[in-house]
């Protein structure tokens, strides 16, 4: 069973998708901690109703961020980390401690439309401005660079001629909610192998 720490900054819709997958038996895991970058994240209110332990990192930065993250993770007994719309960069010491065990969900087909500043509506606006016909979601392992870690799973959605950033975001989010639990299930089953900078899915 995976012992998950889920990192959030907002509503936590992907957190809730992971929780739903655990509840209905699709994912052999337990959420042992939800760590938020903000005290006022709506996800924290939802967690309180579910009796899920939470902590906030608001106002914590620099070396204090690294120490605080690691302390919370160790206290919770977390075995892996899920970034579900988390707006802070993960310190190198945390990445190294959890190598191959940090997954992030990104609302585009990496390596396109990723990197610093590419989050939320900014991603979908960039996709529409580029005129591409396909977007989607990516789950990848996290390294020290934004959105550059090895890709685990991707799924496509069409970009419609009349799309706004809001309509495209809604279509991509639906895919995110399926893709993240699926990737975590592969991790829980020991089917993800990191080799030569790539992720291989074992049969």
Image (spheres, rainbow, N blue to C red):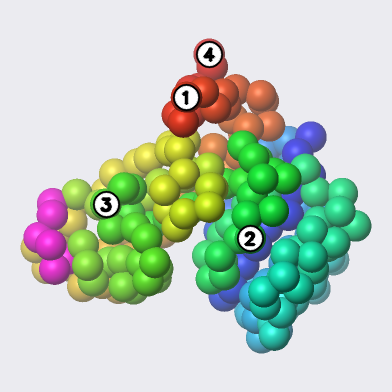
Q: CA distance from mark 2 to mark 1?
A: 23 Å
Left or right: where 106 falls relative to 141: left
Q: Residues within 10 Å of mark 1 (few under 14, many from 20)?
A: few
In this view, the residue farthest toward the top is 203
Mark 3 or mark 1, which is nearer the start of the sequence? 3
Residue bearing mark 1: 196
Circle 3 or circle 4, nearest the eye: 3
Q: Residues within 10 Å of mark 3 (few under 14, many from 20)?
A: few
Mark 4 or mark 3, which is nearer the start of the sequence? 3
Q: Which residues are magenta?
A: 128-133
Residue bearing mark 3: 112
For the residue labelled by badge 1, is the local secondary structure a helix, a strand or a loop?
loop
Residue bearing mark 2: 91
Q: CA distance from mark 1 to mark 3?
A: 21 Å
Residue 60's x, y, as percent? 71, 79
- Magenta-colored stretch includes residue 131: yes
């Amino acid at each position: 069973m995976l012992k998950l720490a889920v990192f959030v900054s907002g509503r936590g819709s992907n957190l809730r998708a992971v929780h739903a997958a655990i509840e209905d038996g699709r994912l052999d895991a337990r959420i042992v901690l939800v760590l938020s970058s903000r005290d006022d994240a709506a996800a924290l209110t939802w967690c309180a109703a579910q009796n899920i332990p939470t902590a906030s990192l608001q106002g914590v930065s620099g070396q204090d961020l690294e120490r605080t993250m690691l302390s919370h993770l160790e206290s919770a007994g977390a075995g892996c980390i899920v970034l579900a719309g988390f707006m802070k960069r993960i310190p190198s010491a945390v990445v190294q401690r959890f190598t191959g065990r940090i997954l992030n969900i990104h609302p585009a087909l990496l390596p396109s439309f990723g990197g610093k500043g590419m989050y939320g509506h900014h991603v979908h606006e960039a996709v529409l401005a580029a005129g591409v016909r396909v977007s989607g979601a990516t789950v990848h392992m996290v390294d020290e660079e934004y959105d550059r870690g090895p890709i685990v799973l991707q799924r496509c959605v069409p970009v419609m001629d009349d799309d706004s950033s809001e309509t495209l975001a809604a279509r991509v989010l639906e895919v995110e909610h399926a893709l993240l639990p699926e990737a975590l299930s592969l991790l829980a089953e020991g089917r993800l192998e990191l080799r030569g900078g790539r992720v291989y899915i074992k049969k």
